Image: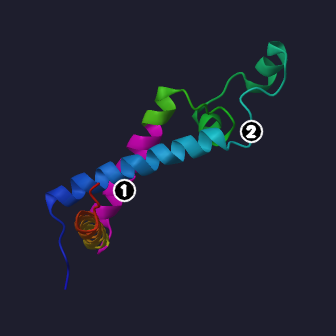
């Protein structure tokens, strides 16, 4: 039986994938193995890091936490890749929809449990 995801499942999954992309951006910028500056002198940095193309900017050390362009590329890329997997992979949308509904049911049960165990002064 093929389970279908509703439109709101895709919207919630897109927001989730955007958050995953943001976390990935922060992890890549903070835990980057290659530093942005290799030397203390800018002339030596220009010799090493001048003329970066897109491949160097993605796979090399030119990646900073405070660049909005890097943040945008990471989040939107992860969001669109997640939606593409949901659309073009068999059963992925049903699996994601089931995960979203399970997570919402768990949050609702947690909320009800907190209401039952609340203490008043």
Look at the picture and state if 95 lies above or below 11: below
Look at the picture and state if 1 lies above or below 22: below
Q: Position of residue 61 (x, y in %)?
A: 69, 36
Instruction: Give the class, few, some or many, for how many residues have Cα within 10 Å of label 1's Cα (few <14, many ≥20).
Output: many
Kind of element beneath mark 1: helix
Q: Position of residue 6 (x, y in %)?
A: 15, 63
32 on left or right of 9: right
Which residue lies at the image location 29% right of the left edge and 75% below the top edge? Answer: 91
32 on left or right of 6: right
Q: Position of residue 3 (x, y in %)?
A: 19, 77
103 on left or right of 75: left
Q: Which residues are magenta?
A: 73-91
Instruction: Give the class, few, some or many, for how many residues have Cα within 10 Å of label 2's Cα (few <14, many ≥20).
Output: few
Look at the picture and state if 89 lies above or below 2: above
Q: Position of residue 103 (x, y in %)?
A: 30, 67
Q: Residue 20: which numbered mark, if any? A: none
* Res. 32 image quadrant: top right
Q: Which residue is mark 2?
A: 34
33 part of magenta stretch? no
The mark that comes first in sequence, 2 or 1, is: 2
85 part of magenta stretch? yes
Which residue lies at the image location 33% right of the left edge and 69% below the top edge? Answer: 89
Q: Which residue is mark 1?
A: 82
**Closest to the observer, 50 or 73:** 73
Q: How is the image coloured?
A: rainbow
* Res. 86 image quadrant: bottom left
Kind of element beneath mark 2: loop
**Closest to the observer, 108 or 74:** 108
Q: The N terminus appears in which quarter of the rendering?
A: bottom left
**Closest to the observer, 42 or 88:** 42
């Amino acid at each position: 039986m093929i389970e279908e995801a509703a439109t709101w499942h895709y919207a919630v999954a897109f927001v989730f994938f955007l958050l995953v992309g943001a976390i990935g951006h922060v992890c890549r910028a903070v835990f980057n193995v290659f530093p942005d500056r290799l030397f203390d002198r800018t002339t030596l940095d220009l010799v090493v890091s001048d003329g970066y193309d897109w491949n160097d900017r993605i796979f090399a050390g030119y990646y900073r936490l405070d660049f909005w362009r890097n943040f945008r590329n990471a989040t939107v890329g992860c969001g669109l890749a997640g939606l593409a997997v949901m659309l073009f992979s068999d059963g992925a949308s049903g699996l994601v929809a089931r995960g979203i509904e399970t997570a919402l049911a768990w949050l609702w049960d947690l909320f009800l449990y907190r209401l039952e165990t609340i203490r008043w002064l």
